[in-house]
Amino acid sequence: MTSTAAKERGQRIAEIMFKAGAIHVSRQQPYILAAGWASPVYVDIRLLIGEPELRQQAVALATNWMKEALQTSAFDALVGAETAGIPFAAWIAERTGLKFRYIRKRPLGIGRNAQVEGGSIEGLNALLVDDLTTDGRSKLNFVRGLRAAGAHVEHILTIFYHDAFPDAGVRLGQAGLTLHALATWSDVLAAQDDGQLSAADRQEIERFLSDPVAWSARHGGRSA
Amino acid sequence: MRELLEWLKSQKGGVSTYWEFQLRALKLRTTEPDQAACLSLLADIAGRFADKYYEEPLPVDAAAGALDRLGKLLGKAVEHSDADAATRLRVLNEISISELEPS
C-alpha cells in the first residue's frame, strides 16, 4: 500500500464522515474518552451506516484496503465487533467473499455461552472490524474472546482511529496486534469539511491536537 | 475496600475506569468475603454505567458526577464495613437503588 493511496483514502473517509455529520465538536462541554482523556470532539461512525450512498462509499474504500491487505496477510474471516463493527464487517465480507462472524462484548451467559457467532472461528485467521478505536481496551477484549475461541488474530481494522493519545497503539502492540485505521485526525484536518465545521470549531480541534494532553488537563480530563 | 477507594480516587472517570472498577470489585470478593454483597452491588452499578456510555458520548460533567457518586457510595461502604448488621443492611439497600447518573 502506498502512502499516497492511504492518504487519499483517509481524506475520502474523512469527507464521508463530515457529510454524515459524524464529527461533533463541543467547545463548552468536552467529552471524556474511555481512558479518561478530555476531548472537544465526539465521532459517531454509526451515522455512516444509515445513509446508503455514504456507507457504500465507505465500504468500497474499506474493501479497497482489504484487497491490498490480502496481498500480504491471508485472512479467512472478517469479524464484526458488537455493535457498529458488525454491519461494516458484513458488507466488506460480502464484497470480498470472505467468511463472516461477529463477536459480542461478552459471552451470552446461557446455553453454549458463545461470544462468537456465525460459526466456528477455530483455526481461522481473523480480521477484527470495528467502527472506531479510542484507547483500544474494547478491541483487546474482543481479541481475547476470539483467541479463546481458537482464532488467530493479529490485525484490527477500524474506520476511524482517535489517535490524539498514544494509549491504543502501545496497548495493542503489546498484545501482538496491529491497528489499521482508514482515517485519523490528520485526515480529518486535511479534508474538505463541506461547511460542517465552523472556524471556531476547527480552531478548537487544532488547539486540541497541537497538545492533547495539556488540553485534556485544562478541561477536566487526565493529565498524564 | 479501602485500597479500591484509594485507586478510584486516582481515576479520571472514563468508561474504562468503570470496567476496571467492576473487575477489581468482583475480584475483591474472594479476599473480603464479608463485603461480597456490597462489592457485587457496586460492581453492578459501575458495569451499568460503563455499558450505557460505551457507545455514547460521556460529557465531562456527567463523568465527574458519576465518579463523585461512586466514590461516595464506596466511601460509605468502607466507613460502615464494621458496623452492626442493621446499619450495613441500610447501606446495602441504599447502594442497591443507586445509579451513577442523575435521575
Image (cartoon, coloured by chain):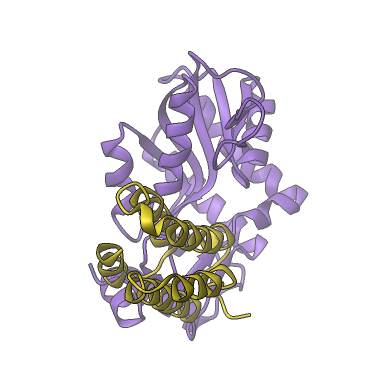
Going by the picture, which residue comes out furthest to the right? A52
* Spot occupied by residue B93 in the image (x, y as percentages of width and height): 55, 71
Which residue is pictured at 45% across the width and 47% down the height?
A138
Q: Nearer the viewer, residue A166 or A21?
A: A166
Going by the picture, which residue comes out furthest to the bottom? A28
* Spot occupied by residue A95 in the image (x, y as percentages of width and height): 67, 27
Which residue is pictured at 45% across the width and 62% down the height?
B38
Going by the picture, which residue comes out furthest to the top? A123
In the rendered image, what is the letter of the chain coloured yellow?
Answer: B
Q: Nearer the viewer, residue A72 or B70?
A: B70
Which residue is pictured at 60% across the width and 30% down the height?
A113
Q: Is residue B103 above or below residue A11?
A: below
Q: Quadrant of residue A203?
A: bottom left
In the rendered image, what is the letter of the chain coloured purple?
Answer: A
Q: Is residue A43 above or below residue A107?
A: below
- Quadrant of image for the N terminus of chain A: top left
* Spot occupied by residue B12 in the image (x, y as percentages of width and height): 34, 71
- Quadrant of image for the C terminus of chain A: bottom left
